Image (cartoon, rainbow, N blue to C red):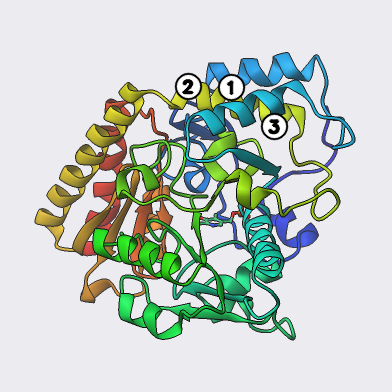
Amino acid sequence: MSEHFPVGRELFDDVMVPNYAPSAVIPVRGQGSRVWDQQDREFIDFAGGIAVNCLGHCHPALVSALKEQGEKIWHLSNVMTNEPALRLAKKLVDNTFADKVYFSNSGAESNEAALKLARRWALDVHGEEKSQIIAFKQGFHGRTFFTVTVGGQAAYSDGFGPKPGAIDHAEYNNLDSLKALISDKTCAVMMEPLQGEGGIVSPTPEFVKGVRELCDQHNALLIFDEVQTGIGRLGSLYAYEELGVTPDILTSAKGLGGGFPIGAMLTTTDIAKHLKIGTHGSTYGGNPLACAVGEAVLDTVNKPEVFDAVKAKHQLYVDGLNAINEKYNVFTEVRGKGLLIGAVLNENYQGKAKDFLVAAMEEGVMTLVAGANIVRFAPSLVIPDEDIAEGLARFEKAVAKLAS
Ligand SMILES: *Cc1c(COP(=O)(O)O)cnc(C)c1O
């Protein structure tokens, strides 16, 4: 392959739609939790492609699954099924509450399928009246028009004309606010079992149990959006397992492909039957390449020793970040679960999370933000402890610069 023109950051502004503001750094290769840019500068990756690269970069099991499938068959469409899709679906069913799987290509599409299924189920079983969907403020469910409207940030859904209707928002961790909205006209409640984009907010156990009970009282489906929390991110295959509550529909994406685009919606036979032939679909959903990689991800991640290590690494981050805070006093709190961690900036640094991200990048460590006031960490689930230590040392240098 030859380029006859410079492929630098400037080209982005020339040829890309301006909906993103990418950093000046253009990574060209990665190995484990380390990444190198065009100038061969090395970075430690605490961002994980926004909680996607659950096994880091170029994990041998994923590379070999992709290569192997790449030499067999790439695509068939849903006019035929394929072996990798059947194998991955079987493994998802065997390891969760679900009996049935629908494959898509992203988180938003998995949620779109979940919401359409809930509406269709309600129409079939209860009638037209039962159409209300309740979600939570600050929630995030993707960027299709339905999912962004269900998401709890009007700033993301405004400005595109009339929105899909019968969608209301309650307050997360506030059962009374849900009680005030829910009724027998509610078809589904959609929630993240830990709000990611919305600020790394864990639900209280009473809240999650209460949401389940209210759904049961009003015959509403409970949809867990596990796009960010799933595939081991919080220290179990899916977060619902440790919350003691089982949803009716669960959506997965991000980590499921470990960097290859794939999404899935999981549900029970009884609910799934309402997506009859022809009611929904996707050209690429269940694509053999994506499912072969997804199967390798699941085989590699779904082990007690991986989940135990996630919990141990969580503690390394929390201890390391708290130690940095002792010295520089920048955070009010370090929170989150597993390897989805938020460091909340104190009153002296309001609105400055992006500054921390930029400074960290300059010191050679990639981080994320969750809103304007939280620095977010979502590294590989198998990041070596030495990389955590080295990345935190680099992060400390960035904090030292900003705090001085
Ligand atoms: C990232 C995310 C989505 C959207 O996923 P896409 O693959 O970008 O469509 C949906 N829900 C949650 C909780 C997410 O974190």
Q: Nearer the viewer, residue 222 or 10?
A: 222
User: Residue 162, image x and y in percent?
Assistant: 73, 86
Q: Which residue is mark 3?
A: 290
* Depicted 215 relative to depicted 23: above or below: below
Q: Nearer the viewer, residue 200 or 376?
A: 200
* Disc on the earlier residue, 1 or 2: 1
Q: Secondary structure at mark 1?
A: helix
Residue at 32% x, 75% y is: 175
Is disc 1 in contact with disc 2, using a CB cutoff of under 8 Å? yes
Q: CA distance from mark 1 to mark 2?
A: 9 Å
Q: CA distance from mark 1 to mark 3?
A: 11 Å
Asked whether residue 359 appears in the rendered view, the answer is yes
Q: Nearer the viewer, residue 187 or 228?
A: 187
Is disc 1 in contact with disc 3, using a CB cutoff of under 8 Å? no
Residue 62 is tagged as 1
**Left or right: 230 as drawn, with respect to 265:** left
Q: Which residue is mark 2?
A: 300
Q: Amino acid at mark 2?
A: Thr
Is disc 3 in contact with disc 2, using a CB cutoff of under 8 Å? no
User: Residue 383, image x and y in percent?
Assistant: 37, 29
* Depicted 39 relative to depicted 133: above or below: above
